[in-house]
Image (spheres, rainbow, N blue to C red):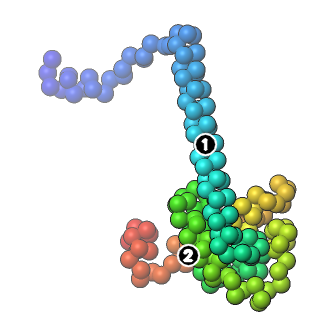
Amino acid sequence: MSYNDEFDSLFEETPPEPRLSTAQVRQVERIASEQLIRGYQALQQGVAVVQQMTGEAVRKTEEAHPGFIERYRNQDICKKFIEQRPAVARAILNAESGQGTDSLSELYEIFAESTQNYAGQSDNRGSGGPTASGSASVLSLQQINALPPEQRREHIAALGDRIADIPLDDGDSENPRYKRERGE
């Protein structure tokens, strides 16, 4: 066989692989199903751990700073906090969603300390939980979950709009990170 024949043989069609038997197909399906179930169970366990850590952080913060929960549920206070401390607000969102949950207690402490003087500056409507007409839920996944299911969609959309930093198109064109992300 010459060099050209060897080269040409690389591009020839390869024979089709043999088909799997019915038993082999069932075996593959069973394995895939087991993997899916294991993944779902792991996800459920992760959610439970995050909820437990969040609940513990809320409890400890309320003990250290009485009135924290009331302020955390107050739409006006949350809006003001988001305006004044956007990076911390994003960090709280991330921690409540399971990313960096270990720092959630510290983040709640920052919220509690920062908002202690807000209470007199707003009307304390938040003691009954979030309402459907405001956007305090842009701060907290827990607040969204406290709403009835039919009212969550608009708050989830508002949350999605506020999680990201400045869109790349609105970014500082002289910023090196902006240039790198744009491929410049």
Q: Quadrant of residue 35?
A: top right
Amino acid type, callout 1: Gln
Q: Is residue 175 visible?
A: yes
Task: Say which quadrant the C terminus sits in.
Answer: bottom left
Is 85 placed above or below 43 here?
below
List x then y, in percent, for residue 82: 65, 78
Q: SS at mark 1?
A: helix
Residue 103 in the image, given as x and y percentages of width and height: 53, 65
Mark 2 sits on what residue? 87
In the orientation shown, which residue stands out farthest toward the front?
63
Residue 5 against residue 38 in the figure, above or below: above
Is 83 in front, or is 17?
Answer: 83
Q: Residue at x 81, y 68 (%)?
A: 130
Nearer to us in this view, 102 or 99: 102
Query: Image quadrant of residue 27?
Result: top right
Determine if residue 82 is in view. no
- Relative placement, left or right, of 22 versus 66 is left
Residue 152 in the image: x percent, y percent? 79, 59
- Numbered circle sitting on residue 45: 1
Alpha-carbon span between mark 2 and mark 1? 28 Å
Say which mark, if any, is on residue 135: none
| Residue 9: image location, x then y, percent | 26, 23
Which residue is found at the position 22% from the left and 27% from the top? 7
Q: Residue at x 57, y 10 (%)?
A: 22
Sequence-first tag of 2 and 1? 1
Mark 1 nearby-residue class (10 Å; few <14, some 14–19, many ≥20): few
Name the residue type under label 2.
Answer: Ala
- Residue 41 placement, left or right of 21: right
Give left or right: position of 175 versus 95: left
Residue in the image at 41% along x and 73% along y: 177
Residue 157 drawn above or below residue 178: above
